[in-house]
Amino acid sequence: MPRIMLPKLFLCLALPFFLVSLGNCTQISAEEKKATHYERGMAYFNDEKYQEALIEFKNIIQLDPKDANAYHQVALIQMKIGGLPALQAAFGALSKAVEIDPTIQDAQLKLGELYLLSQKPKEAKKHADIVLTSSPQDPKGHLLRGRSLIIEKEFEKGILELKKSLELDPDNEQIYIDLAQAFFALKKPQEANGILEQGFKRNNTSIKLILAKGDLLLSQGKQAEAEVLFQRALELDADNDVLYAKLGKYYLATQKWKQAEEVYQKFAKQKPKSETPQILLGEFYTFLGGGEKALEHFQKAEALNSTSIPARNALINFYLDNRKWDDAEKIISVANQKTPKDSFVRVFQGRLLLGKGKADEAIPLFQKVIKDDPNQAMAHQYLGVAFATKKDIAQALQSLNDAVKLAPQDRGIRKALSLVRLAEGSYSLAIEEAQMAIRLNPRDVQAVHLLGQAYLRQKDISKAKKVYEAIVKQIPQDPVAHYQLGLIDRQDKKYDEAITHFEEALTRNPNLAQALGQIASIRVSRGEAKQARERVQKHIDGNPDNPFLYNLLGGLWMKANQADKAETAFKKSLELNDQLQVSYMNLAELYRRTKRTAQAVKEYEKLLEKNPKAASAHMILGMIAEQRKEVEAAQLHYRKTLAIEPKFSPAANNLAWLISEHGGNLDEALTFAENARVQQRDNPHIADTLGWIYYKKKAYLKAISLLEEAAEKLPENPEVLYHLGMTQFKNGDRLKGKKTLEAAFQLSPSFPGAEDARATLEML
């Protein structure tokens, strides 16, 4: 067969044509790829496989960065995924979509809705106006505009927009609900009820309308009618998780504990493989104060679905609330690897740092979370708590008030505010916040204790007594309430009743050494020193590992001039807890009284020869040197103690005191005192040292909260009362200062600072 020969001209013309065709084939191929990704993406989206769908639409954007529809679809997927990071991504995708193609009305509307969520109604209204300009009869555009106006308190204009939306789309249940809420805000409950009835005429089985009507009745105080509607909603849709939560929450709000538990248990039976009812049961038992039961359900929720973020967060929150730092840290570490940008995980990290006494590390972490997510109420709350631990009352109040604006019904925030108000000395405000927390949960024992403390600080003893009596009536096993009632009875000189309460407190908490100390103190004041020692020894026999009990026994033997027995008890106390500063102080005082300081020094120097890293030996040598007025030697031993044990709080505290009292650098003293405070936050001696240093630095507000704490725990220490009285005087509260200084002199006519106190009283 002969070869066909083409003319040269044809070849020249054909080649460019071939190249053009090849280019067209490449273009078609890209469009085909986009179409394939789109088809797959929609299939995944419809099957609720959102992560897979997201990848497909991102592939389209990679092929064509100007594809507005792909950005729109990415946003819709992110909104389905939910959570703050996903919503932020959705906002970015929607913004890009409308920038490329402003005619995508759904993107405009969705972007407006996100602006509403961010409490930016003006921006939302702009997007509604864009839609209505091109489509004046768009019901969703009028709905968005109406909602925006109502948030701006333009109720009448907003209602007109919502009515227009309803005319155009009478089957949209949300419009009836929004209108009802607007009328209720205008204090027009009849109109609110009427618009909901109008909605029921179109659909009398609408769950959304039934719940809205129930909420309306509830806000009008019609609890029984609301309950019927919430129950009806659950009957209509027994598979709806939200309805179980709604009815349970109603029962909690109306203090119907049994019914609430039954609803959650029914939910758990209905969905035995779902973590959601287990989380609700855990939260319910937490609400009632049942820690073990709550933990059981939180752990079960996490076991049912190990990928559930709500289950994980609930369990972490429980561990942190109950100071189970190691358990919390394990889960937080894993969560941080999986979702390092999750704001809740970062807040949990901050709370863990706070629990470990690392407020300086926690504060910038909370601040970063707030910068990324200004509406994170928990971040504001714990930032306030962190500032409070640093005694920065002003910053603490600012952060907690920000938290209240975001979550006014959060009792944790209210309790934190009450604590800070107590520290500030604003007892009436502390009472208000505690009462608010109690209204939110009448069974919150911690809130009730705060109320009692506030009344005590306000010197309203009768109200404080009623609070603690109420706790004992409801929760007889509460040791702190019995202890506080014992203190009140002792103050009223009802010694037998006081002892009864202290004994009950010890029965409930055998390690509550303060209660045993009060019993012993009353016995000694009655001339029953032997019975006091016998009572303490009996308690030690049943609780041989409590160092505070041996310290108490040592003090009783010291009063009885039984030096050997006192020394044995103090040494046993330090053997069990070598951080117990009060035992070091008592042991050093014992050596001073018995004039055995030289002997003691030789013994501890021998010990250091054998073991140069014996921090306790340096500690006691430092205290002996301090008692001998050998300031430089004392400081040297305390510094050596800290070189061996940097977190040895008694040495840090004593060194801070010596530096501040003997013309040293106050900033250095402050650093040592703050380090001691981190290690032993509840130690009143450290609170006194730190408070007195703040006094010398003229930071009187910070000083007062610390010195009040010290005085409350050391009410019979005249030097502590002197420190507090002087600080109150310098802070401008002359009357309180006068009373406190007089109280110091009632305890002792001579104490370190007594001359200064007398001069101040004469001036007052």
Image (cartoon, rainbow, N blue to C red):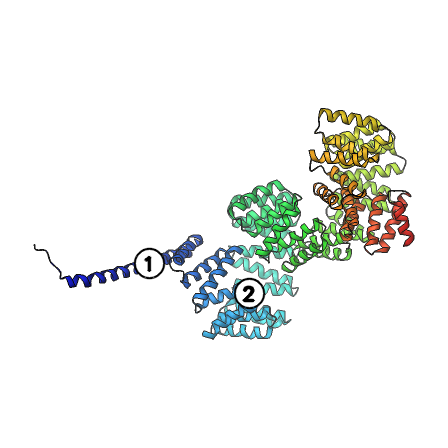
How packed is label 2: few (under 14 Cα within 10 Å), some, or many (20 or more)? some
* Marks 2 and 1, the one that precedes in the sequence: 1
Residue 544 visible in the picture: no
Q: Position of residue 715 (x, y in %)?
A: 83, 44
Secondary structure of residue under mark 2: helix
Q: Quadrant of residue 61?
A: bottom left
Image quadrant where one finds the N terminus = bottom left
Q: Position of residue 67 (x, y in %)?
A: 40, 62
Closer-to-camera residue (80/222): 80
Q: Amino acid at mark 1?
A: Ala
Closer-to-camera residue (276/679): 679
Q: Is residue 714 above or below residue 127?
A: above
Q: How many marks?
A: 2
Residue 69 visible in the picture: yes
The residue wearing badge 2 is 116
Residue at point 43%, 66% (across, down): 100
Task: Answer left or right for 468 relative to 54.
Answer: right
Q: Position of residue 284 (x, y in %)?
A: 62, 50
Closer-to-camera residue (161/424): 424
Secondary structure of residue under mark 1: helix
Q: Position of residue 705 (x, y in %)?
A: 77, 50
Image quadrant where one finds the C terminus = bottom right
Q: Amino acid at mark 2?
A: Leu
Label 1 near label 2: C-beta < 8 Å? Answer: no
Q: Is residue 316 above or below residue 139?
A: above
Task: Answer left or right for 414 relative to 152.
Answer: right
The residue wearing badge 1 is 30
The disc label shown at residue 9, or none: none
Q: Is residue 621 above or below residue 164?
A: above
